[in-house]
Amino acid sequence: EAGVNLAAVHYYFGSKEGLVESLLERLVVPINGERANRLEQFRRGDGNGTLTLEQVVRSFVEPVYEYRGERGRDGKFVSKLVGRFMTEYGEEMWKRMARIFEPTARLFLEEMRRLSPSTDESQLFMGLHFMAGTMAHTVGASDLLEKDPCGVMGGGRSSRQVIDDLITYIVGGLGALIGYEDRK
């Protein structure tokens, strides 16, 4: 559809997976940068540098929704695309995605470790995995949640309501999983 020679994909990107990796990197790196900025803003705003689990989750989730909202149709497409890559591609794509997401994953794992220092590393990772998966699924389904086509919610939800409900849900589940108790 782009009107380019298919061989150009291999020439410039090495493979279809290389093209996808390049696309993801271009889209995800700015979001991950904003996630890190949010953590820092919360840290500075608090004064003592200690974050709550809600602030950590908010820092992870909100930049994705804001990107989606700012970019209109393209943002919705990108959000769905990333969710699809997380669930449909095999080990090769996971390795490529890990390279892109690893710095941010480490940053959020570190924050979760601060909140629950006695929790096993593998449990923290599962919490991060569940948070990312729940977020990806919800972002991908946001249009439906906002329109309520099945009529089961008594009308649609605003994007802000979806974000806030998602954050509440993740904080509850993640907090239970890692043994976090809000100390503020």
Image (tube, grey):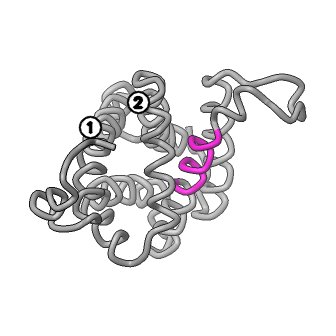
How far, Cα to Cα, is label 2 from label 1?
9 Å
Q: Residue at x 68, y 45 (%)?
A: 169
Q: Which residue is mark 1?
A: 30
The N terminus lies in which quarter of the figure? Answer: top left
| Precedes in sequence: disc 2 or disc 1 | 1
- Residue 67 location in percent, x, y? 41, 30
Horizontal arrangement in the rendering, residue 77 relative to residue 6 (left or right): right
User: Element type at marker 1?
Assistant: helix
Q: 29 above or below 142?
A: below
Horizontal arrangement in the rendering, residue 173 relative to residue 127 (left or right): right
Magenta part of the chain: 132-141
Q: Are marks 2 and 1 in contact (CB under 8 Å)?
A: yes
- Residue 62 location in percent, x, y? 48, 33
User: For the residue marked with disc 2, what is the amino acid?
Assistant: Tyr
Horizontal arrangement in the rendering, residue 50 relative to residue 106 (left or right): right
Q: Which residue is mark 2?
A: 67
Task: Inspect the magenta stretch and tell me whether residue 85 lies in it.
Answer: no
